[in-house]
Image: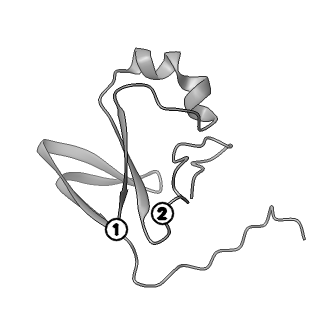
Amino acid sequence: MPNYGFGFQIFPHALAAPGRFQLRLTAIGVPKILANLRTLWRGGPAPAGIYDFHCDRVLIKFDRDMPLQVGGDAEGYRREVMFEMAERPLELIDFRARG
C-alpha cells in the first residue's frame, strides 16, 4: 500500500515488487525532511539519506528500547521488531473505489 493516509505517498515503490513490501529507512534529520516534505508527500524522488528496500522479511534491532506503535496505538517498547509478509493475501474493501 503506497499511501499512509491523506494521500501521503510514504511508500511510493510498494507495488513495484509483488510479494514483497517496501521498507523505507531514514538517516536524515527533521529539517531535511521538512525541506523535502512536498516531494516526499507526492511520492517523488527521495533525497540522499533515505533508503528504500523491497523485503519479504526483515529483523530490525536497536541498541536501546524503542517505542512501538501498531496502527497508531502504543504497544510498549522493543529492542527488535520482525516484519514479514503474510502467507496469504488480505482482502480489503476500498470504499473510495468507483465502479
Q: Nearer the viewer, residue 70 or 30?
A: 30
- Image color mode: one colour
**In front: 51, or 37?**
51
> In the figure, is residue 65 to the left or right of 10?
left
Of badges 1 and 2, nearer the viewer stands 2
Which mark sits nearer the N-terminus, 1 or 2? 2
Amino acid type, residue under disc 2 in the picture: Ala
Query: Hey, which quadrant is residue 8 in on the image?
Result: top right
Badge 1 marks a residue whose secondary structure is: loop
The reply, left or right, for residue 66 in relation to residue 24 is left
Q: Position of residue 25 (x, y in %)?
A: 33, 41
Residue at the right extreme, as displayed: 99
Disc on res. 39: none
Question: How dense is the environment of label 1, judged by Cα within 10 Å: few (below 14), some, or many (20 and up)?
Answer: some
Image quadrant where residue 75 sits:
bottom left
66 sits left or right of 74 in the view: left
Instruction: From this view, report whether residue 44 is shown above or below residue 23.
Output: above
**Residue sitting at x 57%, y 52%:** 2
Q: Hey, which quadrant is residue 1 in on the image? A: bottom right
Tell me if mark 2 has few (under 14), some (14-19) or many (20+) residues whose alpha carbon lies within 10 angstroms of its own: few
Whole-number angstrom distance, CA of label 1 to CA of label 2: 10 Å
Type of the residue with mark 1: Asp
Between 23 and 94, the one lying in front of the other is 23
Residue 56 circle label: 1
Name the residue located 68 percent from the left edge and 43 percent from the top edge: 6
Residue 32 horizontal/vertical position (percent): 42, 17
Q: Is residue 4 above or below residue 17?
A: above
| Residue at 55% over, 24% down | 37
Q: Secondary structure at mark 2?
A: loop
Which numbered tag is attached to residue 17? 2
